[in-house]
Image (cartoon, grey):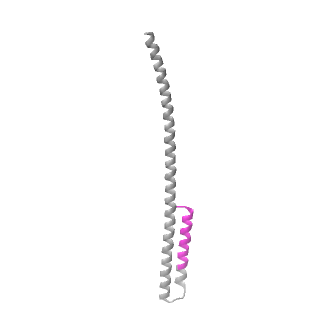
């Protein structure tokens, strides 16, 4: 997980703890305290969803970037191999030409 994600989770946890302690130690009626806790829980749930969405987007983006990088590397390797194959074919054609030349010379002397 990245530093940004850890920081966001740390801030979120601190907010939850602070809000919960503030509500529990506040001199309010039980009904009001329960309402505040419910509201704060809803806010925390929304923040968790938002943070999870951000982390998911970052991970997805990272995976896609790595996939694109891998695709680019594979293309590069295939391209290099294609050039190497052309070099091998050129050398083989040259050798074949030499062998045909030697064969012609041998047929003339025989």
Q: Which residue lies furthest to the top in this view?
A: 110
Query: In the image, what residue occupies the spot 52% across and 50% down?
Result: 69
Give the dominant element type of the magenta stretch: helix, strand or loop: helix
Q: Quadrant of the C terminus?
A: top left
Q: Which residue lies furthest to the bottom in this view?
A: 29
Image location of residue 74, percent across then percent down = 49, 45
Image location of residue 31, percent across then percent down = 47, 88
Query: In the image, what residue occupies the spot 48% across and 24% down?
Result: 95
- In the rendered image of this protein, does residue 52 appear above or below residue 94? below
- In the rendered image of this protein, does residue 18 appear above or below residue 80? below
Image location of residue 24, percent across then percent down = 52, 83
Image location of residue 37, percent across then percent down = 49, 81
Foreground residue among 29 and 49: 49
Check residue 6 for magenta coloring.
yes
Query: In the image, what residue occupies the spot 53% across and 75% down?
Result: 16
Query: In the image, what residue occupies the spot 43% across and 13% down?
Result: 107
Foreground residue among 62 and 3: 62
What are the residue bounds of the magenta stretch? 1-19
Q: How many numbered marks have been drawn onto this rendered protein structure?
A: 0
């Amino acid at each position: 997980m990245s530093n940004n994600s850890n920081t966001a989770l740390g801030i979120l946890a601190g907010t939850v703890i602070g809000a919960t302690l503030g509500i529990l130690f506040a001199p309010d009626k039980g009904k009001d305290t329960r309402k505040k806790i419910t509201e704060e829980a809803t806010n925390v749930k929304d923040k968790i969803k938002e943070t999870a969405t951000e982390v998911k987007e970052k991970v997805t983006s990272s995976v896609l970037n790595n996939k694109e990088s891998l695709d680019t590397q594979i293309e590069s390797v295939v391209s290099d191999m294609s050039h190497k194959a052309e070099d091998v074919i050129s050398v083989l054609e040259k050798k074949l030409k030499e062998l045909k030349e030697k064969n012609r010379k041998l047929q003339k002397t025989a």
